Image (tube, rainbow, N blue to C red):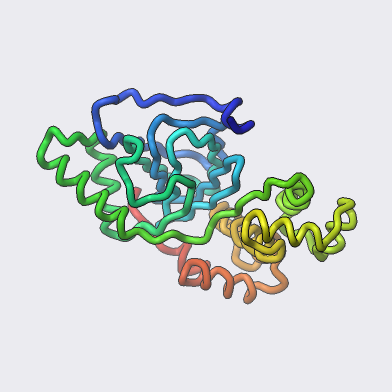
């Protein structure tokens, strides 16, 4: 059992009969939900704001139009950036066979978004009622077609690589080169690079780029201007940040955060 799981609160579903239960709540900027885990799989979506989900294995940033998939019994905490309108589905374990047994960030299509909001309005879905059975089947069909988004930051297991990751997490905008950070931490740069690649399939440089993008997303959700978010997250220029943002999310930061959606 992971360290986070041992100290986390277990939240058992009150509704044992439904195939899909739902949860709807709005949160203020900066609100944090402490570590907990469920006996059901969870699809966590924000129709407004940005959420950061943390587990022992890594960090996932969930901007508007995306969702995070959290399998049952995975302990996690959630932090809000900007005011967040959270919408969640709780599925009986293994109901969604098309989704992995690990956390991941997912694209939410316009159709899936409307299905998710309809399910939240219904409260709970059971196969006993024909119209709810049809809605469940369409939701599950959409899960089969869903696309994953590279907005996760896996944590290496080795203590040497994890120590470097912790230094970078503490200050995503740290201007020092990797070799300077490794030297200050008493670690070999070559060893750290090998450990990152072997354990999480990502170089420290790529990991750092991902960290900075996720930090900038949180800053933008909290109201920072694009230029300030880029600088504070450690980008050399705003244009470098915009290029990385476009590559990950398919549009510019200004265009992305100017889109308004209903709760």
Residue visible at 49% across and 52% down? 62
Q: Is residue 263 left or right of residue 73?
A: left
For residue 246, side relative to residue 127 (left or right)? right
Q: Is residue 190 left or right of residue 6?
A: right
Residue 119: x %, y % from top left:
25, 42
Of all residues shown, which one is farthest toward the front?
198
Image location (x, y in percent) of residue 133:
16, 41
Q: Residue 193: name its quadrant.
A: bottom right
Which residue is located at x 38 percent, y 34 percent? Answer: 40
Number of marks present in the image shown: 0
* Image quadrant occupied by the N terminus: top right
Residue 109 in sight here: yes
Residue pushed farthest left? 130
Locate residue 224, reporting x and y percent.
60, 58
Tell me residue 82's x, y (percent): 52, 48
Position of 29 with respect to 85 (left or right) is right
State the image quarter where residue 125 is shown.
Answer: top left
Residue 229 appears in the rendering: no
Q: Looking at the image, is 2 positioned above or below residue 200?
A: above
On screen, residue 19 above or below 109: above
Which residue occupies 32% across, 35% down?
92
Location of residue 243 by image quarter: bottom right
Q: Residue at x 37, y 41 (%)?
A: 88
| Residue sitting nearer the eye, 76 or 261 | 76
């Amino acid at each position: 059992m992971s360290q986070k799981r041992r100290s986390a609160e277990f939240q058992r579903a009150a509704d044992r009969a439904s195939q899909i239960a739902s949860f709807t709540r709005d949160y203020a900027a900066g609100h944090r939900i402490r570590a907990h885990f469920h006996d059901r799989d969870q699809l966590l979506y924000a129709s407004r704001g940005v959420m950061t989900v943390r587990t022992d294995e890594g960090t996932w940033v969930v901007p508007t139009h995306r969702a995070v998939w959290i399998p049952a019994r995975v302990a996690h905490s959630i932090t809000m950036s900007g005011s967040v309108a959270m919408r969640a589905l709780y599925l009986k374990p293994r109901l969604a066979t098309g989704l992995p047994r690990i956390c991941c960030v997912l694209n939410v299509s316009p159709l899936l978004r409307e299905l998710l909001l309809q399910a939240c309005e219904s409260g709970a879905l059971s196969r006993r009622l024909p119209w709810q059975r049809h809605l469940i089947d369409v939701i599950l069909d959409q899960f089969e077609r869903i696309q994953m988004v590279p907005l996760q930051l896996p944590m290496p297991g080795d203590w040497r690589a994890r120590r470097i990751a912790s230094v970078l997490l503490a200050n995503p905008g740290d201007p020092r080169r990797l070799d300077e950070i490794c030297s200050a931490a008493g670690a070999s740069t070559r060893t750290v690079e090998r450990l990152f690649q072997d354990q999480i399939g990502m170089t420290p440089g790529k990991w750092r780029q991902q960290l900075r993008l996720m930090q900038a997303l949180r800053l933008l959700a909290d109201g920072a201007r694009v230029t300030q978010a880029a600088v504070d997250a450690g980008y050399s220029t705003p244009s470098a940040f915009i290029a990385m943002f476009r590559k990950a999310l398919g549009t510019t930061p200004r265009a992305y955060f100017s889109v308004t959606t209903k709760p």
